Image: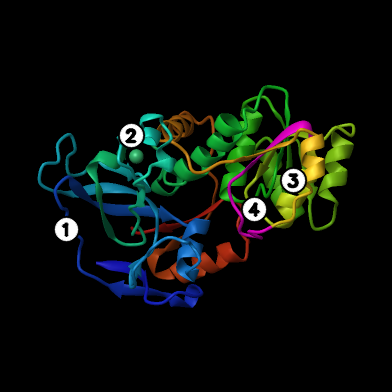
Amino acid sequence: MKAIRIHRFGGPENLVLDEVPDPEPGPGQVVIDVGAAVLGHLDVDIMRGVSRLPFALPHVMGLEAVGRISALGPGVTGWAIGDRVLPSIIVTCGVCRFCRGGDDALCVDLRYQGKTFAERMVCEAAHLTRISMDLPDEQVVAVPTTFGTAWHMLFTRGNLRFGETVLINSVGSGIGSAAVQLAAGAGARVIGTASSDEKLAKAADLGMHHGINYRTESVVEQVRKLTGGLGADLVFEHVGGDSFRWGLESMATNGRMTICGAHSGEVVPVDLIELFRGQRSVIASFGYSKNEAARCLDLAARGAVRPVIHATYPLAEAAAAVTAMERRENFGRIALVMR
Ligand SMILES: [Zn+2]
């Protein structure tokens, strides 16, 4: 079969379309004919060798996919060849204190399944979700991580309530465009930032109430102006660097900020005096639970949220797809389609 592999860490030029042996399912595993996969920032980190996760080279790229079961390993029950399924990007132990508490992403024995940028992949049958909705593959696969992560940040960690004001950074990203829809749907007043007026217009179509172009306007000043000087009750921050800094300064007194990413700067200065005198909370958020992903898939199946796909590329053009994402050209997610 064909697969996108890296033989060394670096830029998109290292993504090679290789011919590799078909995967064989072990006990408790299935093989899936991949229909579509999506790109995420973690894929870029893995490609560049900065993910802080152990990957041996050569490595088949990709973390998220949807497809149909094409082979069953020994001992697999409850699944049949042809079933449309979505494998979890992580495999968890199911028995540690975090798994038992529903915090799947914090599992002490967590590992990534991945290897989805390929015609076929192998995965654990215990970590599959059955897909019965009519949406095309590239939209289905765009739901769990973007909407699940946004749900976890907004509601589970950020405790967003009806009528509150939320500042969502970088609404053009997959997770940003998901957060806009979830927050607006939950009755919050949504202020969003983006690098262009075009992206802001698209976010407005998804329910964003006020847009701030961070290349031409001061985010902190605009948030203060829009909130009568109070600031945002909740800041949704997934970018890092300057975005984290203006998020801190845009928080209301007694406000919260949930964070889950740092691609634009992993180490940032924080004014501790302002933080504690204003009783402001910075709340870390990691991943999402299977229950949160299931809720979001149900919302998408009912048309209550819309997974936003910027573009689809054939598997062979993975390098072009990653390049587009690294240039932040996208509004929504970029998918690879195998058919
Ligand atoms: Zn566990």
> x, y percentage for residue 164?
73, 26
Q: CA distance from mark 3 to mark 4?
A: 10 Å
Give the class, few, some or many, for how many residues have Cα within 10 Å of label 3's Cα (few <14, many ≥20). Answer: many
Q: For the point 80% across and 58% down, which residue is it?
A: 215
Image quadrant of residue 205?
A: top right
Amino acid carrying mark 1 in the image: Glu
Q: Are the residues at dot 4 and dot 1 in contact (C-beta closer than 8 Å)?
A: no
Q: Which residues are magenta?
A: 252-267
Q: Which mark is residue 24?
A: 1
Query: How many numbered marks appear?
Result: 4
Q: CA distance from mark 2 to mark 1?
A: 26 Å
Give the class, few, some or many, for how many residues have Cα within 10 Å of label 4's Cα (few <14, many ≥20). Answer: some
Q: Which residue is mark 2?
A: 132
Of callouts 4 and 2, the N-terminal one: 2
Q: CA distance from mark 3 to mark 2?
A: 39 Å
Q: CA distance from mark 3 to mark 1?
A: 47 Å
